Image: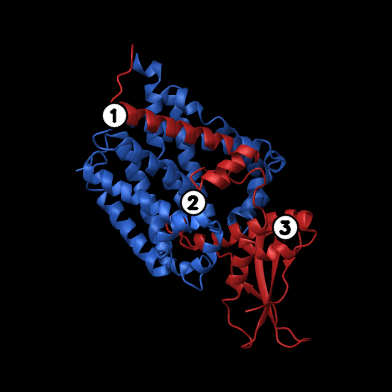
Chain colours: A blue, B red
Amino acid sequence: MILLNDISQTVLIILSIGLLISTLEYLKKVQIFSPNGLLSWNVMQLKWTKQNEKSFFKPLFKLFSAPGLAALFIIRCLLIIGLLFFPLQSTTGWVLISLLGVSLLMASLVTYYGSDGSDQMSMLIIITLILCNLPAFTTGKLRDIGIWFIGLQACLSYTVAGIAKLVSAEWRSGTAIKDVFSTKTYGSKKASLLLQKYPSANRFLCWNVIVMETIFPLCLILPWQYAIVFLIWGFIFHFFTALIMGLNSFFWAFMATYPAIYFINHQMPWHLF
Amino acid sequence: MMLKLNPIVIYELVVTIFLAFWFLSTILCQFKETKISSFIRYKIDYFNLIPLWTFFAPHPGKRDYHLLYRDRITDIDYSDWQEMEITEERTIWSWLWNPEKRDKKILSDVVQSLVSSIPSYREKAGSLNLLMFSMPYIIVLHAVSQYKKQSQNCYRQFMLAESSGYQKETAPSLILLSVFHQI
């Protein structure tokens, strides 16, 4: 039986919810991999033009049809469900997460158009958990290093996003969010109209995102009662990007990193004495 | 004090170095494209493991892309332009369950990749003829060629356009008009 008092296990459980939803979404849309689909392997294989790449990945190519990928996604769902019953530190748990990692890596060869930052964060977490929980080779120290890696990558992601916005004139002028919300791709008519009506709200939101993302790594070193403000902000931020922009998988992928941030924060010297 | 090397210590060391390299590579591959970041992204990172964390910045995606196609019926007669649905209104459950985002994201990535490569093709080759051999162009052509043909021996043309979504401040504009392709 799994226990949530282990940080790595908590990270995995939160991530698993998002991965299960994302895999079921791919299953629903599996026709995109059919010969008539957007990611038809007839076209996608043109990416592998070099002979050495072709021969290296060729054994996998037969899998990249709609039925092959549907089977892969069903197996992935079963692996994720299996991880609810076997702890990460058990041999069975490690085998399950390793197979899950292999399925993610295989699918990434055909989904390089259409994948997003949440897919990359999910892959990053799964590979780290596989490497840092290898039975018989893993020490508590290595597990901690893995958690540090996940927490630091999460903080890097926010800071990079914040700095990239800070150097952007469109973000600084406070029009960026209104402009994004006004697109049909990532926006919402209601949110767009609301922000057009209240330009000051638009400016506040832009600067709120710039400042909070840029200084997000402070949550690693601030005393916990202040650090938690950043995590609450992150929760609200990701919830609303899921609600307004439809970026549902980002919510789970980034929430999964928060236990790692909590762990790092509580390893800071002022929490030890 | 000497570190006693045993398989566990060696494994710990190898994984730690690997994670450190991964973290450093991630930092190097943000913001500006350099020789090192290009090498990491295009020569090493087959599985797309090096993320780009600059979400919606520096240029927030403030345009909607439109993909349209038409058929040549005779030398002087063409069908009406048909729009391929790339964007779709979200449902109230999209915050939890949003399979439609995949189609949208794929086409959006492909179109953006095509749009961003146009200047370099113009600069290097002087014309856009070579663009027809690029991966995103072929994906778009493949996507539009799946729709019902006007005749057996069909020639199809596609057009990429952009608009400002729900805002009607600016008129839609043309990005790319393809030649007619036999499909």
For residue A239, say whether it is visible.
no
Q: Are marks 2 and 1 in contact (CB under 8 Å)?
A: no
Give residue B16's position: percent from left, percent from top: 40, 30
Q: Nearer the viewer, residue A83 or A213?
A: A83
Name the residue at 71% across, 65% down. B161
Q: Secondary structure at mark 2?
A: helix
Crowding at label 1, few (<14), some or many (≥20) Cα neighbours within 10 Å?
Answer: some
Answer whether residue A234 is visible to the viewer in this image. yes
* A222 versus A40 height, above or below: above
**Relative to the observer, which residue lies in front, A67 or A253?**
A67
The local secondary structure at tag 1 comes to helix
* Residue kind at label 3, given as amino acid type: Ile
Give how far across and how far down residue B74 sits, in percent.
74, 88
Q: In the rendered view, does B183 fall on the left or right side of B2?
A: right
Q: CA distance from mark 2 to mark 3?
A: 32 Å
Q: Which residue is mark 3?
A: B118
Instruction: Identify which residue is drawn at 40% across, 20% down.
Output: A268
Q: Where is residue A163 shown, x and y percent of the image?
A: 62, 35
Measured Cα–Cα span from mark 3 to mark 1: 52 Å
Q: Are marks 2 and 1 on the same chain?
A: no
Task: Indicate the amino acid at tag 1.
Answer: Ile
Of the 4 image quadrants, the one containing the N terminus of chain B is top left
Q: Where A94 falls versus A19 (above or below)?
A: above
Number of disc labels: 3
Q: Amino acid at mark 2?
A: Ala
Whether A155 is drawn above or below B177: the answer is above
Q: CA distance from mark 2 to mark 1?
A: 42 Å
In this view, the residue in front, B161 or B130, is B130
Residue assigned mark 2: A242
**Mark 1 highlights which residue?**
B8
Q: Nearer the viewer, mark 2 or mark 3?
A: 3
